[in-house]
Amino acid sequence: MSPINHDSLRRAVPPGYDQYREDIARGKIETVEYFSMTVGCKRKTMIYIPPGYSDGQRGYNVLYLLHGIGGDEAEWYNHAGPQVILDNLYADCKLAPMIVVLPNGRAMQNDRAEGNLFDADKLKAFENFESDLLHDLIPYVESNYTVLTGRENRALAGLSMGGGQSLNIGLGNLDQFAWIGVFSSAPNTKEPVLLVPNPEEAAAKLRMLWLSCGLLDNLKHVSDRTHAYLERNNVPHIWYEESGGHDWPVWKNDLYHFSQLIFR
Ligand code: FER
């Protein structure tokens, strides 16, 4: 895979990609709870199960899709209707079989997006999520759904704070994730040299690293810095600068494209 810059993808979104279609099979999206040893309480996550899912089947890949600083496990659902975008893609045979887990990435007792979202303990909770994800949520998902459990069957992606988490956690745990998607990553993103201390290893292990950001995004310097380092150190990635700002049309567009490229 070579680094490519293709803003033209933006134009490739077909009209109606995010509109509810009457005549197609539907997946199911619901909220479930799991016990987190990391946080010491039950935590909520949303989960999208694709049309045709059945326990008897061989197993599904899993995409963990993370929210931003102002959100929680329902942020994607409330703003983007991911189940509509994904149902439409399944109807057009454009997705590999996957369930999509929409966790709450603020791993602390009160994980609601309230008060000052930049409080130190709340920012720390976005770091704590690494342990919640690896030791609590993934085991829960893998013991309650018919999913495949190899690194090549797991993707981690997210927007803004969740994009930073996807880089920090994903690149820090390449034995767990082969596919990483980063949409408009926030200043929680580690410095490149800490993120990828061993570029050769990252290049060998990654099946795909997608890095995108809106050209009008005030946080674009974070993505620029990451991209420049990856390029300089020959870590293949898709670099996608797109029209738009720090906003939902950008992230919906990213989900539409990224989801079609994983688990191939
Ligand atoms: C910051 C600016 C924005 C920051 C985080 C954000 C941790 C997150 C934005 C988002 O998730 O939308 O300085 O620092």
Image: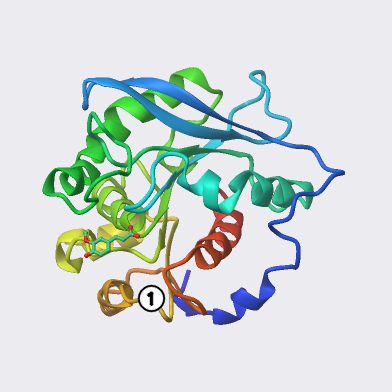
Asked whether the viewer can see residue 162, the reply is yes
Q: Is residue 110 above or below residue 219?
A: above
Foreground residue, 101 or 54?
Answer: 101
Picture coordinates of residue 202 (x, y %)?
Answer: 30, 58
When asked about the image quadrant of residue 12, the answer is bottom right
Tag 1 secondary structure: loop
Local crowd at mark 1 within 10 Å, few (<14), some, or many (≥20)? some
Measuring from the top left, give residue 205's x and y in whole percent.
Answer: 35, 53
Q: Nearer the viewer, residue 120 or 206?
A: 120
Between 230 and 156, the one lying in front of the other is 156
Using the rendered view, name the quadrant where residue 109 is placed.
top left
Mark 1: which amino acid? Asp
Residue 41: image location, x then y, percent: 26, 20
Instruction: Kindly tell me whether residue 95 is visible in this rendering.
Output: no
Left or right of 179, for residue 134: left
Q: Is residue 250 above or below residue 57?
A: below
**Which residue is depicted at the point 29% across and 36% down?**
111
Residue at the location (36% across, 53% down)?
68
Name, please, the residue furthest toward the front.
115
Residue found farthest to the right: 23
**Which residue lies at the image location 53% right of the left edge and 23% below the top edge?**
145
Which residue is label 1 attached to?
217
Where on the image, by quarter, is ligand 1? bottom left
How was this image coloured?
rainbow
Quadrant hosting residue 127: top left
Residue 131 point in image, percent of width and height: 23, 34
